[in-house]
Image: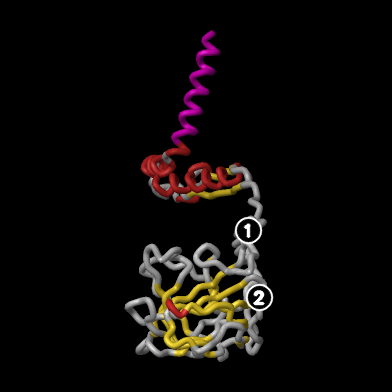
Amino acid sequence: MVAAVLGVTVATVGVAALWFTLEYPGRLAAMITSNGASASPDAQPRSLNSRYLDLGGLHSSVDPTSSVETARADRSKLADRSATRAKPTAKATSTKPKPSPTKASPKPAAAPAPKKAVAEKPAGQPSPVKLADGRPNFQSPFTCGERWRGTTYANHNPEDKKIDFFYQDGETRGRDVRASAPGVVNRILPEIGAIKIYHGDRWYTMYNHMDPILVEVGQKLAQGELVGKAGSVDTGVPHLHYEQIYDADNDDWGSSPAEIVNPIIQEVRYSLSAGDEPIIKSTNNC
């Protein structure tokens, strides 16, 4: 048992001596030098003159006279070198470029719907003789280029179908009144200064308040032919009263106001109310 205790004691002292030698080489060298000052450095034991360490294949020499700080720095470098060897290699990062997001292209604008073709009268083409409803292509009952103002009033019987014309650019009285389509004089009513012209296919026109009347019953007329002068017969104000009539019952007599219709003048349909005053420029025989 004594031998075992001695063995443990010796081992412990040996480990302590080894630790002291590694941790404080400078202090140990100083102690040895003070105990044997007359000895030369070459006479010192090899273990006190230098120490050799082999850590992972690294051979290093440390001067026993170096400072403690130098030894610690040396050990720190060795530890960093060992850590670097032990550190696993980082996994290579793929350098393949990420595909750039595809930019959305703007949607093309919807193509505009084609416009409906509008029938236009070609330049120089003569006006139609008849319109779609069978009536003649009635023109303004005045001389080409003149402007007349169309009016009506309440209880004109019917007010939306009868038109009273006033000359727009001067005195109405005495202005020429002309046939708005070819026809035959059907009737003359001198008491109201009126004539009625038959144009065929049950269509009539009527012109009132003229003074004088310049045609006779049965007389054939061309479009634009003079039939009278604007006056004030049976009315207090000079003007021309104008109607278009369709013989609906086919009795060879265009009755006014029973068979009067909304007039179409120069291919424009009119349905007037009191206060309406359209200006119509005549194209009769232009």
Three-letter code for the amino acid on which mark 1 is drawn: Thr
Looking at the picture, how far across and down is residue 89, in whole percent?
A: 63, 46
Q: Nearer the viewer, residue 188 or 47?
A: 188
Looking at the picture, how far across and down is residue 39, in whole percent?
A: 43, 47
Looking at the picture, how far across and down is residue 209, in whole percent?
A: 42, 80
What residue lies at 61% left-to-right and 56% top-to-bottom? 101
Looking at the picture, how far across and down is residue 275, in whole percent?
A: 36, 69
* Residue 54: quarter of image: top right
* Residue 246: quarter of image: bottom right
* Quadrant holding the C terminus: bottom right
Report the span colored magenta: 1-20
Distance from the alpha carbon under mark 1 to that under mark 2? 76 Å
User: Residue 240, relative to residue 48: is it above or below?
Assistant: below
**Residue 102 tag number:** 1
Q: Which residue is denoted by mark 2 in the rendering? A: 200
User: Across the whole image, how many numbered discs are drawn on residues?
Assistant: 2
Q: Nearer the viewer, residue 17 or 286?
A: 286
Q: Secondary structure at mark 1?
A: loop
The mark that comes first in sequence, 1 or 2, is 1
Q: Nearer the viewer, residue 224 or 184?
A: 184
